[in-house]
Image (cartoon, rainbow, N blue to C red):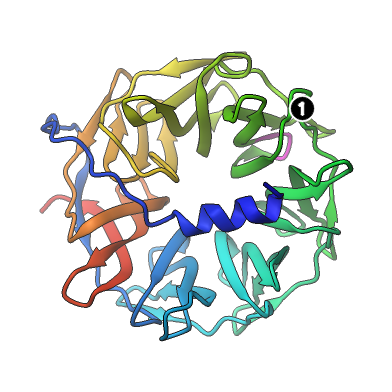
């Protein structure tokens, strides 16, 4: 399968949710409670939110894509929504792909400096798509293109002149195969920064998530397709000079797994989450880096969505980490605990979470609304308990 086809497959199975198990959540020790905040939809059919980033309590951004074709064909267009402190609204987004546009990541530097990243599709070929908000309008910003295709799945900011985006690109003969892709904004242009690929690559490597701890402590995670038709979780670190693959417990094992989220408290306290594929279904996966080594972290929860598991992470402190997906889980420094949250419909899934303050978090995703016969946006807010 080509890299472009793999990305298209990933998109096509986003709505494939396997219901979580019926385990009863333990009573968590958390600061508040989650509630649904009404959010708009741009399409009567498919509306999918994939990332969220906060500037302030009255300035939060969420991005994804929606189906712009009211007919039987899926014609995705960029979806951008904004919270102004009172309500969420759809903000116009430029679209460049003849066949579609997808946004997968968003990062806010300031109220007048916000980035969104994903990819556009033209006649079956994907190319990285980067948008920028200047306080008034979203515009397309040129970025490197690659023969055969490329895609971005996450973006994060160190500063206004140091922004990173990660994903995958088509590389080399006899391929084509998919290789990791890292881009950097230096204040004036986007440039590719060389990133490694594991030597045992069989088909496609993708970076799915990004965690910026400091300018010289950045983590990217994803998956490495290996011979035998399965995947290894992939972990990479930027040390200020270059990217390097860092071994994790699944690097050389027979475990079929992928990572889709990463967040760090400090250089010696980083979490990654994703899924493990097995005969009993798709199960949550947590990895924890303490000191100089990645270890498997204990998790709770049952069968999860194919594309994500706990697909959003935010780390507030060593004893205060949140993970969202088909469930919401909280790490208190000793264990992960499932936290109650409103699930309004079938296939409820949260794909990203962002911090405003320690007890002010936003999570975004989508669910199937049987009354509307449509997949609609879902935005939830953690606020202090009354």
Q: Is residue 221 above or below residue 193?
A: above
Q: Residues within 10 Å of mark 1 (few under 14, many from 20)?
A: some
Q: Position of residue 231 (x, y in %)?
A: 58, 30
Q: Quadrant of residue 83?
A: bottom left
Q: Position of residue 58 (x, y in %)?
A: 39, 70
The residue that disc 1 covers is 244
Q: Is residue 118 visible?
A: yes
Q: Position of residue 339 (x, y in %)?
A: 20, 39
Judged left or right of residue 277, residue 248 is right
For the image shown, how many numbered marks are present on the structure?
A: 1
Query: What SS does tag 1 mark?
Result: strand
Q: Which residue range is magenta in the image?
A: 215-219
Residue at image point 67% right, 70% down: 121
Q: Quadrant of residue 282?
A: top left
Chief secondary structure of the magenta portion = strand
Judged left or right of residue 371, residue 79 is right
Judged left or right of residue 49, residue 345 is left
Q: Is residue 289 magenta?
A: no
Residue at image point 43% right, 43% down: 308
Q: Is residue 70 above or below residue 14?
A: below
Q: Camera-side residue: 261 or 373?
A: 373
Q: Is residue 356 visible?
A: no
Q: Quadrant of residue 236?
A: top right
């Amino acid at each position: 399968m080509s890299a472009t086809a793999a990305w298209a497959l990933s998109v096509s199975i986003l709505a494939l949710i396997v219901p979580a198990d019926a385990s009863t959540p333990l009573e968590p020790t958390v600061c508040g409670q989650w509630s649904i905040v009404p959010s708009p939809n741009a399409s009567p059919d498919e509306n999918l939110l994939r990332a969220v980033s906060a500037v302030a309590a009255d300035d939060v951004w969420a991005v994804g894509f929606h189906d712009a074709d009211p007919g039987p064909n899926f014609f995705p267009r960029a979806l951008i929504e904004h919270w102004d402190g009172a309500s969420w609204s759809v903000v116009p987004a430029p679209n460049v792909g003849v066949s579609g546009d997808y946004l997968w990541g968003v990062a806010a530097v300031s109220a007048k400096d916000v980035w969104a990243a994903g990819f556009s599709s033209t006649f079956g070929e994907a190319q990285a798509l980067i948008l920028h908000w200047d306080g008034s309008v979203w515009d397309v910003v040129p970025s490197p293109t690659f023969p055969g295709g490329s895609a971005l799945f996450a973006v994060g900011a160190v500063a206004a002149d140091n922004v990173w985006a990660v994903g995958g690109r088509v590389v080399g003969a006899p391929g084509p195969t998919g290789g990791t892709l890292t881009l950097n904004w230096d204040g004036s242009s986007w440039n590719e920064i060389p990133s490694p690929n594991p030597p045992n690559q069989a088909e496609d490597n993708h970076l799915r998530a990004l965690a910026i701890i400091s300018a010289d402590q950045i983590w990217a995670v994803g998956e490495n397709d290996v011979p035998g038709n399965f995947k290894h979780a992939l972990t990479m670190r930027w040390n200020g000079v270059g990217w390097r693959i860092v071994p994790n417990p699944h690097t050389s094992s027979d475990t079929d797994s992928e990572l889709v989220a990463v967040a760090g408290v400090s250089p010696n306290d980083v979490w990654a989450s994703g899924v493990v594929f097995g005969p009993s279904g798709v199960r949550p996966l947590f990895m924890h880096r303490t000191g100089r080594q990645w270890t498997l972290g204990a998790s709770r929860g049952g069968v999860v969505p194919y594309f994500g598991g706990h697909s959003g992470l935010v780390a507030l402190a060593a004893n205060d980490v949140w993970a969202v997906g088909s469930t919401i889980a909280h790490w208190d420094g000793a264990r992960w605990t499932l936290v109650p949250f409103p699930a309004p419909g079938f296939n409820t899934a949260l794909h990203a979470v962002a911090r405003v303050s320690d007890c002010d978090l936003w999570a975004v995703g989508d669910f199937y609304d049987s009354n509307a016969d449509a997949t609609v946006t879902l935005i939830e807010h953690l606020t202090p308990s009354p």
